[in-house]
Image: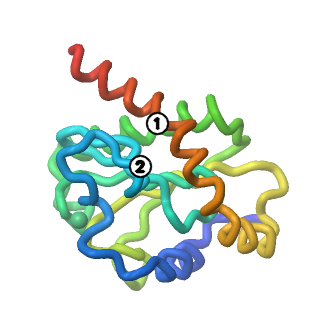
C-alpha cells in the first residue's frame, strides 16, 4: 500500500459526523479556544480544530475564519496565515506525537470528498510506521473519542502560546 492519501475515506469519516448546528469552523466564535468544539486556536484569520472523526490520532483541521469554500477566494493574508499555521502545526505535532511523516491536503468540492465543502480546510494528518493497516485505522476511529480530549489538552498550550506570541508583536 503505497498511496496513503485517500480523500474518499476522509469523506466517509466526516460524513458520519452528527448533524451539527451550523458550521463546525465557526464554533466558539470570539474565543481563542473551546474544548467542547475541539477548537485549539483562533485568531483574526485562522482556526485550528482537532478532527472529531480522525483518520489518525491528532488529525488537525486548519481553516480560515471566513466562511469561504474556494481556495481562489482567499485573500492573500489568509493564504499566508493558512500556510504558516500548517508549518506551526507540524512543529507542534512533531514535538508531542513523534510522527515519522504527514499527509497534508485539501479536498475542494463535494466530488473531491470534502466533508464540509462550504468552508475550505486543510487536513494535517500525522503518520507513524505501520499505521496504514486499514482495519487498525477504522478500529481507531471508534476508540479515539476516549483519547481525543487528552490529545486536546496536550496540544492546547502550544497553540495558545502561538497566540500570545502574536499578541506580543
Ligand atoms: Zn463556515
Where residue 110 sits: x, y (%)? 37, 82
Residue drawn at x 60%, y 62% as measured from the top left: 145
Packing grade of label 2 (10 A; few <14, some 14-19, many >=20) is: some
- Residue furthest to the top in view is 168
Q: Badge 2 is on which residue?
A: 35
Work out whether mark 2 precedes mark 1 in sequence or the reverse, and give the earlier one: 2
Image quadrant containing the C terminus = top left
Task: Nearest to the eye among marks 2 and 1: give it.
Answer: 2
User: Disc 2 on helix, strand or loop?
Assistant: helix
Q: Split into 4 quadrants, where in the image is the N terminus?
A: bottom right
In-image side of 71 versus 136 (left or right)? left
* For residue 150, side relative to residue 30 (left or right): right
Tell me which corner region of the image, top left, top right, bottom left or bottom right, holds residue 27.
Answer: bottom left
Indicate the quadrant where residue 37 lies: bottom left
Q: Position of residue 166 (x, y in %)?
A: 26, 23
- 105 over 70 or under it: above or below: above
Q: Observer-nearest residue: 98 or 142?
A: 142
Q: Residue at x 43, y 62 (%)?
A: 106
Kindly check if marks 2 and 1 are in contact, taking CB atoms under 8 A apart as contact: yes
What residue is shown with label 1? 156
Q: Position of residue 114 (x, y in %)?
A: 41, 75
Residue reaching furthest bottom?
Answer: 111
Mark drawn on residue 22: none
The CA span between labels 2 and 1 is 9 Å
Determine the quadrant in which ligand 1 lies.
bottom left
> At which x and y percent is residue 70?
24, 67
Amino acid at each position: 500500500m503505497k498511496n496513503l492519501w485517500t480523500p474518499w475515506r476522509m469523506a466517509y469519516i466526516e460524513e458520519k459526523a452528527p448533524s451539527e448546528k451550523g458550521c463546525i469552523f465557526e464554533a466558539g466564535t470570539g474565543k481563542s479556544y473551546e474544548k467542547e468544539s475541539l477548537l485549539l486556536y483562533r485568531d483574526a484569520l485562522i482556526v485550528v480544530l482537532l478532527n472529531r472523526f480522525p483518520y489518525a490520532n491528532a488529525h488537525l483541521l486548519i481553516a480560515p475564519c471566513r466562511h469561504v469554500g474556494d481556495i481562489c477566494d482567499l485573500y492573500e493574508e489568509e493564504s499566508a496565515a493558512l500556510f504558516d499555521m500548517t508549518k506551526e502545526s507540524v512543529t507542534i505535532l512533531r514535538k508531542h506525537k513523534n510522527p515519522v511523516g504527514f499527509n497534508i491536503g485539501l479536498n475542494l468540492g463535494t466530488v473531491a470528498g470534502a466533508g464540509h465543502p462550504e468552508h475550505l480546510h486543510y487536513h494535517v494528518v500525522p503518520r507513524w510506521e505501520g499505521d496504514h493497516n486499514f482495519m487498525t485505522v477504522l478500529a481507531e476511529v471508534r476508540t479515539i473519542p476516549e483519547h481525543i480530549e487528552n490529545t486536546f489538552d496536550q496540544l492546547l498550550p502550544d497553540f495558545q502560546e502561538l497566540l500570545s506570541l502574536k499578541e506580543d508583536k
